[in-house]
Amino acid sequence: MEQASAAHAPGELILRLRGVGKKFGAVTALEDIDLDVHAGEVVALVGDNGAGKSTLVKVLAGVHQPTSGTIEVQGKAVTLDTPGKALELGIATVFQDLALCENLDVVANLFLGHEISPWRMDEVQMEVRAWTLLQELAARIPSVREPIASLSGGQRQTVAIARSLLLEPQIIMLDEPTAALGVAQTAEVLNLIERVRARGHGVILISHNMEDVRAVADRIVVLRLGKNNGVYTAETSHQELVAAITGANENAVSRRAARKLEEVDQG
């Protein structure tokens, strides 16, 4: 099956959601969601627990089908009724658990299910392609024959992202890619996200870490209680983002910021 190509002009609209909703029985998980993703940009999806981020990711990944609204890829209305259909249309997802096989090496994980000449396993060509892709991403992987079990958290995240890029997707969704990583490993993954953006892919980044989001995101889309609650940029203050996420203008963060401003004025 032919995969969608990632070759787009920078800024070209790839994905457009309008009025997307999802109900589970009497429970409304998403309501009237609008979202745009362009080529060569990182869109961060943020919100509190229960805001609908995971549901929206699963809708775009073809795991859940929306109960209302439209999804367009490159201007054409599409139905993402299976994960395979989402991949075919160029939407790849790297979930938080990464789904890597720890006993297999990097090459085997990259091509798992998509082996070159699977009946005779063209190991040489797969190894060359693996090295080429990892070098393009400036990945810090000691060897493509290294078993996943011996890699750090950041290196594992790199392998998972590289695996999704092998199919040349238009959009990559990253679910909490820096969760449980140290400072150095987090920086490594954020650098990788920037390199993926530079390749012309659209990136949807789901994260709870506002510093990570503001470091790489071109736009920050806030979800609250299953609805859109504003679109912001990296220049938006931490206080304003927290207010949008929590729905409260008056909270511990805003009070602390106000006290600091008062101290500066009085000083």
Image (tube, grey):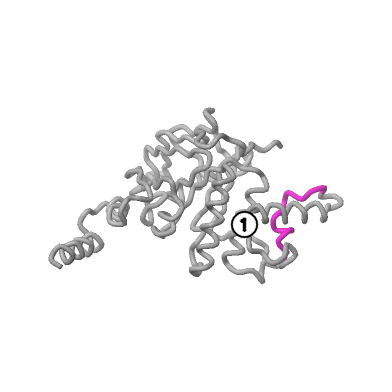
Tell me the magenta residue range: 104-117
Quick one: which residue is furthest to the front in this view? 267
Q: Position of residue 92 (x, y in %)?
A: 59, 46
Pick the quarter of the image with the C terminus.
bottom left
Quick one: which residue is furthest to the top in this view? 76
- Quick one: 25 or 74, which is closer to the camera? 74
What residue sits 22% from the left and 53% below the top?
249
Q: What secondary structure is marked by label 1?
A: helix
- Quick one: 255 or 246, which is closer to the camera? 255
- Quick one: 233 or 75, which is closer to the camera? 233
Residue that numbered label 1 is attached to? 160
Q: Is residue 144 left or right of residue 38?
A: right
Quick one: which residue is furthest to the right in this view? 120
Q: Is residue 68 left or right of residue 10?
A: left
- Is 232 included in the stretch rendered in magenta? no
Quick one: which residue is furthest to the bottom in this view? 150
Residue type at mark 1 is Ala
What residue sits 57% from the left and 64% below the top?
154
Q: Position of residue 146 (x, y in %)?
A: 72, 67
Question: How many other residues sit within 10 Å of disc 1, few (<14), some (14-19) or many (≥20)?
Answer: many
Q: Position of residue 129 (x, y in %)?
A: 74, 51
Q: Is 145 located above or below residue 54 in the figure? A: below
- Quick one: 215 or 173, which is closer to the camera? 215
Q: Quadrant of residue 258?
A: bottom left
What residue sits 77% from the left and 56% below the top?
127
